[in-house]
Amino acid sequence: MSDSSSIRKDERFDVVVIGAGVIGLSSAYHMKSENTDLRIIVLDETGAAGQGDTAKSAGAFRNVFTSDVNRLLAGSSIDFYGHIQKDLGFNLDLKYSGYLWLLADKQFRRLENVVESMRREGIQLRIWEKKDLKDMINGVNLEFGENDEEAGIIKAENVVKGLQGIKCGVVSPDLIAKFYEQEFRKIGGTIRYNTKVGSLLLEPRARLGIPSEPLIWQDKKISGVKTAAGTIVADTVVVAAGCRADRLLDPIGIDARFRPRKRQIFSLRSPKIEALLNTKGFNEYDMLPFTITPRAGVFIRPEPTERGFWVGAADELGRSFRFEEEPQAERDYYTYSIYPVLSKYFPQFMDVSPTNMWAGLYDVNTLDAIPYLFEEDGAIVVSGLSGSGIMKADAVGRMVTALYEKKEYANLYGGKEIRVARLGINERDVGIERFVL
Amino acid sequence: MSDSSSIRKDERFDVVVIGAGVIGLSSAYHMKSENTDLRIIVLDETGAAGQGDTAKSAGAFRNVFTSDVNRLLAGSSIDFYGHIQKDLGFNLDLKYSGYLWLLADKQFRRLENVVESMRREGIQLRIWEKKDLKDMINGVNLEFGENDEEAGIIKAENVVKGLQGIKCGVVSPDLIAKFYEQEFRKIGGTIRYNTKVGSLLLEPRARLGIPSEPLIWQDKKISGVKTAAGTIVADTVVVAAGCRADRLLDPIGIDARFRPRKRQIFSLRSPKIEALLNTKGFNEYDMLPFTITPRAGVFIRPEPTERGFWVGAADELGRSFRFEEEPQAERDYYTYSIYPVLSKYFPQFMDVSPTNMWAGLYDVNTLDAIPYLFEEDGAIVVSGLSGSGIMKADAVGRMVTALYEKKEYANLYGGKEIRVARLGINERDVGIERFVL
């Protein structure tokens, strides 16, 4: 761990990457790996790799999307993570334990065509009958009587089918970050932790010594960053700062193109729920897939090493857009918003309280929920990961590299290509994501 | 002027419109005019119509656009303003005095095709030769010698042509707002000034009396607004609050889809510049058109009643996105950013200092600079006017009305139709604006 006091004034690098989360580290690693002579420095205000919102993630991944961009970004990244763990022997706690969407009748009928079209694109999906789900999942409650008042209040609909994404599962975001950190350092990359970037340096290309420079008629360029310990000058600044990006980009008038929204995770352990951990039939690990209920996106994620589950939800309207330095999980949110749904479908959670909880911030792209990647006057901005950054980080890092190299296409892991401008603004072309529940 | 203390608790209206700027008042007027039984109330924190950013506008309008949506919105609104002034006898200080773009060679060549395509769409344009411009515009400087060091520093390029938009000109935004206010009141509309909306009311459709409602599994609806003087309940809330919209929408998790950016205007009066006011040949008023220089969007707008000019600029990179309650114009901005360009092309401005200056906020849509209009759970949001709200306010008000009435198309003044969803999010279809200088 480097100390920020070691930064001298006006150090020079070719590239400064702001943010040592999965996106910043993947970008730094791929840029350096493709351009070994480049002097690249990664800066992060925390003390280690992936300790910002990367660490707050639910650590799940899926390749189940209708947008071909989503499939390319997530699919190739997941394959690369599999390669890291299997071929390179770097453990990521990655398990293809699957995603399991429990579907109400209306949802299933709406998705039938979507499922077919995804299958044609090679996405492995399995549909389970209600009877199978009942047999396989300990204690699960899929049907509610007409007199079930609670079910009526929370509008818990009967589940008719289960949809399993096979090439989906769980992974440790922290370990992905550590992999990129290790590899980036191996090839000579520099990382400084505990180093907060205060602002971007916007300078006229030709300084005149006039007050208030840069003036409106001057050609300008982002030419580095200011930190408490001094200025770092660079030709290119990669802004991979997640929900902190707007604090850097707003002052120079570049829209970071996301809104910050808190997402909470509650960790639950209890002898009552242990049986649910051992669920046979869905995968080789005999564990429950990452399972999503039909109401409000309430999900449960097995965490076998903790002998428990993480649970959360995908709330939208009513959940404010707001930046907080240290977002806190709210016990009331568990009690009143998540618990009624969770305990309805999984009665074994009844009276189980969270033993731990935490909150992170999503940088939500409210336009299409697919990342933005664009270059503007010396800055490369990658933003709007919308909570699916972990599962797309490898592809995004390769696209950052291609954008830096002014290549039209990025080569993703596995050999597929993607046009870099598809994630940009003017020529944005990200398809339509119709797999939304 | 109503006092906010006259609001009783839990008043009920059919529609609350937040904001008595041109957009809010046009929307309220058209909604009420089409649905005379509707109980509509307009709320504004200032003391009179159009006293927010409407009043800070440069008060200019143009129909010169390549996007058909821009042409429809501005063209039909301008026609309606002409109708108000000519046929209804309500003075708006509207003059078809023209826009005049002074074009450097590169700009002209880039725009030649664009000009042709706009002409095919019926936009009246006139191209002036350099010689004509020199003869017509008192003291204008269109060519700079190679030894002109100042011109070199600010990169003042030689002007080769002038492009005049004929159906363009100046208008008083304040008077447009007053027109809608008067007409809205005539047909029974209610307006309350000095009434600040503190928050939107987001409520479950069925309240249960549980803490932290609305919960994530409850169906929710925006059902009114809270003000210091009490709650106003309404079926529909129209958010036409300009740069204040995100303060209302962020807390309930709706993206207002704009970034706030300060724009400044400097008012100049001096005997030295009076001759420029009387410029013959461009229009029936023998006045200089609203004239845009080739550098940094520096413009001059004749203000004959003040015997002077308003000047400003269209800066982008380096001009922060930031909300300020009371944005202030900066004298240094005039001195170092505007003045060098202005006095280069118009030497009569040399040593003339602003006698007055003010600043407003643009609500910039950084995606395509064309307004957003969408409905979400009881709220109709109109935002991202991007500094061209005055010239589009009438059409936008009619589209708000159509959206409220759940009509697919809005009828604009003059008989043309536009699909309401074209300004929305999911089916957004606004064409490409290629007339950007």
Image: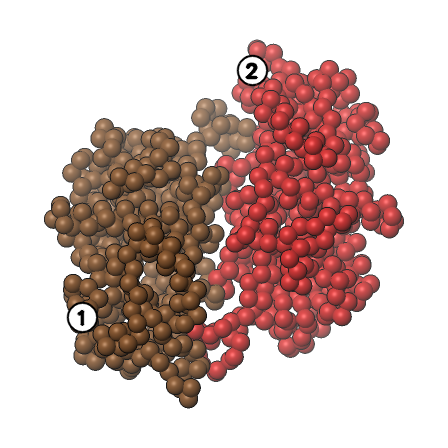
Chain colours: A red, B brown
Q: CA distance from mark 2 to mark 1?
A: 80 Å
Left or right: residue A64 versus residue B365 is right
Q: Name the residue carrying label 2.
A: A149
Residue at the limit of the structure toward the bottom, as seen here? B147
Res. A53 visible in picture: yes
Q: What's the residue at 67%, 63% (across, down)? A: A405
Res. A359 visible in picture: no
Q: What's the residue at 27%, 47% (across, down)? A: B77
Left or right: residue A411 versus residue B3 is right
Q: For the residue carrying disc 2, how many other residues have a C-alpha within 10 Å: few (<14), some (14-19), or many (20+)?
A: few
- Secondary structure category for the residue under label 2: helix
Q: Position of residue A300 (x, y in %)?
A: 69, 32
- Residue A231 higher or lower than A291, as above or below: below
Which of discs 2 and 1 lies nearer the camera? The answer is 1
Q: Residue type at mark 1?
A: Lys
| Quadrant position of residue B268 | bottom left
Q: Name the residue carrying label 1.
A: B280
Q: Residue type at mark 2?
A: Glu
Q: Position of residue B351 (x, y in %)?
A: 28, 82
Same chain for mark 2 and mark 1? The answer is no
The reply to whether discs 2 and 1 touch (Cβ–Cβ < 8 Å) is no
Chain identifier of the residue bearing label 1 in the image: B
Q: Position of residue B422 (x, y in %)?
A: 42, 41
Residue at the limit of the structure toward the left, as seen here? B89
- Residue B63 higher or lower than A262, as above or below: below
- Secondary structure category for the residue under label 1: loop
